[in-house]
Image (spheres, rainbow, N blue to C red):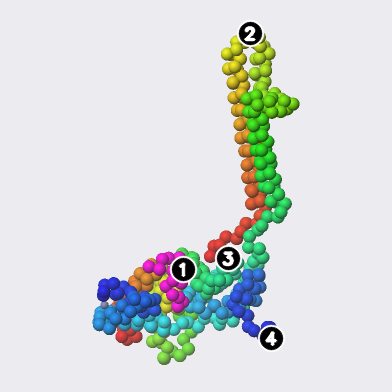
Amino acid sequence: MHNQLFPLLNAYLDGELRGPRLRDMERHLTDCETCQRELDELRRVSDLLRAAPLPAFTPADRFASNLTLLLPRRPQRSQPRRVPSPTWWLVPAGLLGLWFFLQTVSALTNFVYAADASGLLGQVAPGLNVGPTQTAWFTATSNLFGVQMSASLQSTLSLLNQFNVLGAGLVQGVFWQAGILALCIIWFLAWKISGETAPVNNL
Amino acid sequence: MALTETPKTELDLIQQAQAGDTWAFGELVRHHFSPVVNVAYRICGEMTLAEDMAQETFLRAWVNLNSFQPTGSLKNWLYRITVNATLDVLRRKSDMPMDDEVVQMIQDPTPDPETSLVQKERSENLQKLLRSLPLATRNVLVLREFGELSYQEIASVLDIPIGTVMSRLNYARTRLRDLLKEQPSMQEAYA
Ligand SMILES: [Zn+2]
């Protein structure tokens, strides 16, 4: 018990012990002379420090009035954080809208192409003309060798053409999404630069 | 109810000062000068330096006042600034050494030489003993004995765990006790 309580004598002296610890300490102090002596000595150090006289400082009134003359102008900050104006918010909102629109158009186009390729469209909506799904090289090759091409070669070319159309779609998709992302980053940077920098808390 | 008659609360003054009112800030300085300069003096041991540190503390407090949360204790926030300002001032001071005795002789007015001489000597001695403690330990002891903060408050002012507060305080008081035992001039006061 003594070994556990001895290091807590300062905490006891400072009124920092609570509950069972405090009761243990009080009980222990009644019959441990070592702890009693140590506590007395620590208390004397503390009393001596607190009783040490202070020099005659400048009176508080004078110090305060001298200090107020030294105060630098502080930038007024009625709003703790700068909130961008509604016009600023229109930019990312517009970009988000654009992304949504293009994503929807792309998904619909892919769906229509897929439906067309599988021949569904002709049955469901015979009047709907999907338009060219061929790449330039496929059209050129077909026109050049149209008649001489074997059936297997033609189907291979047709398959390659499908991949190419799909690939071009993917590349385009990546490009315009990257473009929108870039615009978002530019907007954010512009906002950061135009805004006042928050004061550094260098206490 | 004469609302204009009621004295301004500290919270009112803080909010006014945060809005840029230098008069309100002056009132806050007036209230807190004594605890701040006392803590500064106990850390550095020199009167002029302590007042410089107090001035530095309040200037920094003014500049950063908007970052102070009025729910917290202004005094503890000021102590935190004082401790950090002290670190800077002492660092700066270590570049140009000063003779402590000379500085003390010039600064300390001795109103009644006969009675206060022993006391003055004792006080200077005590300050010297305090300064012999490592700064980190001294800060904890000073905030406890002269700032009258709880262990929890000291921990948050100095950004250290409460266990560190306890161990530094144990070390500081035990070390001072041992040093006092060695000092013949202090034995009388200590015994
Ligand atoms: Zn014991």
Q: Nearer the viewer, residue B8 or A18?
A: A18
Instruction: Give coordinates of residue A113: x percent, y percent.
Output: 65, 28
- For mark 1, name the chain: B
Kindly indicate whether the residue at mark 4 contacts the one at mark 1 (C-beta within 8 angstroms). no
Relative to B71, say whether A141 is above or below. Answer: above
Please say whether residue B77 is visible from this viewpoint.
yes
Q: Which residue is mark 4?
A: B2
* Residue located beneath label 1 in the image: B156
Q: Which of the 4 image quadrants contains residue B128?
A: bottom left
**Residue A124 vertical position relative to residue B34 in the rendered view, above or below:** above
Q: According to the image, label 3 marks what residue?
A: B67
**Element class at badge 4:** loop
- Which mark is first along the chain, 1 or 3? 3
**Label 4 to label 2: alpha-carbon separation:** 107 Å
- Chain letter for mark 3: B
Which amino acid type is marked by label 1?
Ser
Name the one closer to the observer, B123 or B166.
B166
Badge 4 and badge 3 in a common chain: yes
